Image (cartoon, rainbow, N blue to C red):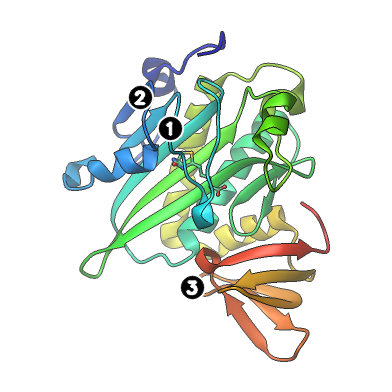
Amino acid sequence: MTDFAPLDIDMIEAGLDTSLVANKILLYKATSSTNDVAWEYASNRDNNGLCIFAEQQHAGRGRRGNKWLSSPGAGILCSILLLDMDDAGEMLTLAAAVAVAETISERLGREAKIKWPNDIFLNGRKVAGLLVESRPGRGVVDYVLGIGINCHQDRAFFENAQLDNPATSLDIETNSTVDRNTLACDLLNTLDRRLNVMQTDTDSIIAGWKAAAGLLGHHVVVEHNRRRFAGNCTGIDPARGMVLQLDSGGVRAFPAAQTTILKQSTCP
Ligand code: BTN
């Protein structure tokens, strides 16, 4: 563990103003993955909204089989259990990405960008990521929403990690030490607000996402089911994903879960 202030459930709870998210919070010193822990609590429906934090993960995972690396005590590693939700399609991912970007932007006083569908960038480098996992039930879906935010990592950490994409932390970007407890509290409050809005006003989530993404109208190359497609992004469809006017002709939607952006004419 580093010398940084540890996460503290009492401090996080003291600032909470949520209706669903974090009705209960558990903090682990170390675990495999907070997403796995959250799923273990899914059989008790009273655990809807449960939030799991960990100071360290031995097997943190990202999208598409990637690992999520974070040194002990250096990041926000959390997972929120959301039970019996309407099948929100891609909307939950968009709402969560907007909430994380908004939390970071407000904290730093400068705009964090979303790289489709749910990577959060500062200064052209990835600072946070989301992993949305789902298990369908009868007419409803259970979700675990995993969020990782780089907070105290230094440049050497990312150099040694040999990541595919450049990454950064909030401390590097601000040249100061972020308060993880306040950040965690802001994150849960913002997420709760965005999830409430999502129930009634999907347009405003999409508008928030578009504002932070800067993808619309730009040329992108994506990989989908091991094939490459290139085209101009003409929209985001909450049910079907990113819509491209393909260079090869025709319009096609690409769902987030099976698609990666390889090239984008503007870097977030
Ligand atoms: C990505 O960028 O590919 C998604 C990264 C998600 C990482 C978080 S950290 C907390 C939660 N537990 C995990 O194992 N993954 C998510």
Q: Which residue does the image show at 55% across and 25% down from the upper left?
A: 71
Assign a secondary structure to mark 2: strand
Picture layout, residue 229 above or below residue 248: above
Tag 2: Cα neighbours inside 10 Å, few (<14), some, or many (≥20)? some
Q: Which mark is residue 258?
A: none
Compute the Cα span from label 1 to label 3: 33 Å
Q: Which residue is mark 1?
A: 58
Instruction: Name the side, left or right, on which 50 lies relative to 122.
Output: left
- Mark 2 sits near ligand 1, with its Cβ under 8 Å away: no
Q: Which residue does the image show at 42% across and 51% down from the upper left?
A: 196
Q: Which residue does the image show at 80% across and 69% down from the upper left?
A: 218
Q: Which residue does the image show at 50% across and 54% down from the upper left?
A: 65
The amino acid type of the residue labelled 2 equals: Leu
Picture quadrant where residue 207 is located: bottom right
* Picture coordinates of residue 157, whole percent (x, y): 67, 27
Q: Which residue is mark 2?
A: 27
Q: Earlier in the sequence, mark 2 or mark 3?
A: 2
* Picture coordinates of residue 107, whole percent (x, y): 65, 29
Report the front residue among 142 and 196.
142
Q: Earlier in the sequence, mark 1 or mark 3?
A: 1
Picture layout, residue 95 above or below residue 59: below
Picture layout, residue 38 above or below residue 203: above
Q: Nearer the viewer, mark 2 or mark 3?
A: 2
Picture layout, residue 254 above or below residue 207: below
Compute the Cα span from label 2 to label 3: 34 Å
Report the front residue among 182 and 228.
228
The amino acid type of the residue labelled 1 equals: His
Compute the Cα span from label 2 to label 1: 15 Å
Q: Which residue is mark 3?
A: 239
